[in-house]
Amino acid sequence: MKSIKPIDRNTYLHGRPHSPIEQTRFIGNIKKALNRTDATPHALEDLIQTVPNADDLSLMETIHGRNHEKRLTLLNRMMEIGSTINMEVMVAETEADIAAALAKIAADRNAEWGDEKSIVAWDHPLVNSLELSVAMKPLGIPVYLPRADSSRAEAETFRKQAETALIGITSADFGLAETATLTMKTRVGQPLHVSLLPSIHIVVIRLEQILSNLKELYTLLKWDPEQKAEGITHTMTFITGPSKTADIEATLVHGAHGPRELVVFVLV
Amino acid sequence: MNASSYISQSRAAIADPVLRNALTNLQERFGKGTAQGYLDFPEGPGLRFKAHDIRMKTIENLDILLETLANNIRKCGGHVHFADDAQAAVDCCLDIAQKHGVAMAVKGKSMLSEEIGLNSALEAAGIEAVETDLGEYIIQLAGETPSHIIAPAIHKTRQQVGRLFQEKLGIPYSEDPPTLTLAARKALREKFLNADMGISGCNLACAETGHITTVSNEGNIRMSTTLPRVHVAFMGMERIVADLKDHDILFRLLSMGGAVQNMAGYVSYRGGLGENGLFAGPREFHLIIIDNGRSRILADPDFKEMLCCIRCGACLNICPVYGEIGGHAYNSPYSGPVGAVVTPLLKGINRHADLCQGESLCGACMDACPVNIDIPRMLLLLRQKLAEGDKTWNVNVKSRLEQASFKVWSALIQNPRLYDWFLKTAFWGQKFLPGKEHMISRLPFGGSGWTCSRDLKKITGRRFIHRIKS
């Protein structure tokens, strides 16, 4: 590790790219290029919509008014699209069914990063309801959870556990049927690396969380009072299929850096 | 970086059957797939035109949008820096690295970082910079430069990669892509876990929410921006949208244009990380917004359309010229039709004069472009500037001889008598040139380039109008 030289905050702030002076000059260059004058009418409101229009409201109504049948149609679509990108979407009726299926996956697969098989999971109501520790006990596979109030040291310990884990279990905010995409915001107790470091990523969602497409998602994020209040958090992730690459002779290979397998359980 | 290098590198590429095979393979899969994909959008192929409008409106309001983005990121604890040129951007990154005592950085694929020469600057400062996109990793190990915006190692065969990994990673030789990918996965996992800094580009930032976005299929950018202590993102100043709504259309088009996908594997939004940052990941997020010649393009009404580009590489996958010569001949991180316009505009029109002249103007790039940029129009305009010179862009006339020849030609065809005399003289003169019955196989002097790969039909000595009358 190189020694850290102290930086004089004053020299750092002035004449450096992040000083307010630099920003004003930089934006000034753009204004000049755009031939902006003070008389040019331009307002942020013309660029960023601040009030939902009729289309937005009717789409919100469609989403919220969707019945069970229509949701099952979306689920079928998600399964169909998922199968084309090597993402398995499975339907489950009870939490116990999911736990049993998970135990089977855990028993079948080999450990990749550690000598022993292990599981890391989100601290999330739906994931907690699977009672994973109970399901994995006969297999002797430990299940690690982050603690919501964890300190930095505890968070580091949990990350080490994620680094060697075979399976990472998360939920998601939404599933998008048209592209088989899962979307996740970042919250306390739900670290980003659970969906990233383990060899297999498993997602558990409820049927009601499936939307049709990106447009519906963005409409909710933009106009739904609850979503709007939370914002999209410091990191929002969309996951569509397992990690893949085609960088050697344009040949598709799964498991480049992230999870080599992605399985989604939908609780109906 | 001159004429001879473009021509000689193109010649070498055309003579390389392995490369041409790889390029054909790439264009077969991606070029055709993308074209079909556009037709299959629920909104139909017209979505590209809508995207073009969105992009134009965005770049025409870049000042407001960038200020909004910067304010929103800072509000959430992120750091935003503005860099006029490559040097300022690199210095800014080095400052951050120094502040955090960075010894190793892992990088997601970013053509902008290639543009500003980030890797060599980091290495000069004693910081190990590891490319983590498989294609970029391969060419970094090989000491080469990317030959495609999305598939940087497309010029390498599986056998070449096999030998490279055998030598550099010490694994047994294999030419099986899954085995090779697994070897890279293992080697790079260690780098991800031990790196101090993660570096990414930015696909399309969102001004409204104050986030950048990154897109990948491998998950390497997620690793780079989730695991190290500090995340530094580089963003060309035009890579932004106003609000989330625009992302709907643009991400679908980007995924289709880039890799024939309905949706890319991973899309991540990253905004300010707040006071403590991530507990087991980056504690700080820095965004460096870069001009480096872009405001000059923005100021020219003829060229500002080029800033609509979202760097998906779709035009490379269809271009008949790229399909023959590959990416290295373009001498720039930006190759193919996009490179033939962007590279001269960013780095000097005279310096990269051959790029626009090498393209065929067939228009395939425009049809393949997810945001429908009129690349042929701008190629033609660059040629015009090279032919006539241009003060705003400091372009010198490329060839005085060519300019003079066209002046003579123009005088000739405007004077019927002189033209008749020229035809007769040329008719007799061509008998001294090598060739077959009706064809000339080699022209002398400056004309030799014309006949180096084709024959020229002999002239008849009489004007068409006279021949048709008799």
Image (cartoon, helix red, strand yellow):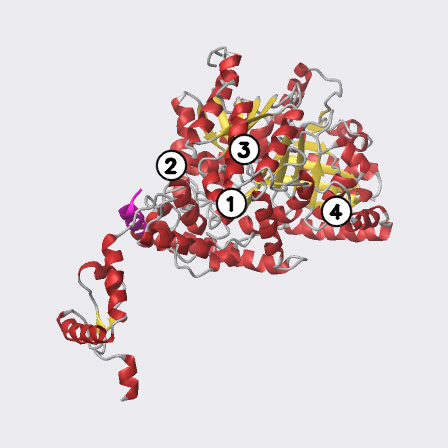
- Per the image, the residue denoted by label 1 is B307
Label 4 crowd bin: few (<14), some (14–19), many (20+), radius 10 Å = some
- Per the image, the residue denoted by label 2 is B142
Decide whether the magenta segment is chiefly helix, strand or loop: helix
Is B32 in front, or is B60?
B60
Is residue B258 visible in this depiction of the protein?
yes
Left of B410 or right of it: where is B62?
right
- Chain under label 1? B
> Is residue B148 placed above or below B376 in the rendered structure?
above
Give x and y (percent) for residue B35.
55, 59
- Chain under label 3? A
Which secondary structure lies at badge 2?
A: helix
- Per the image, the residue denoted by label 4 is A216
Label 1 crowd bin: few (<14), some (14–19), many (20+), radius 10 Å = many
Q: Quadrant of the N terminus of chain B?
A: top left
Which secondary structure lies at badge 4?
A: helix
Which secondary structure lies at badge 3?
A: helix
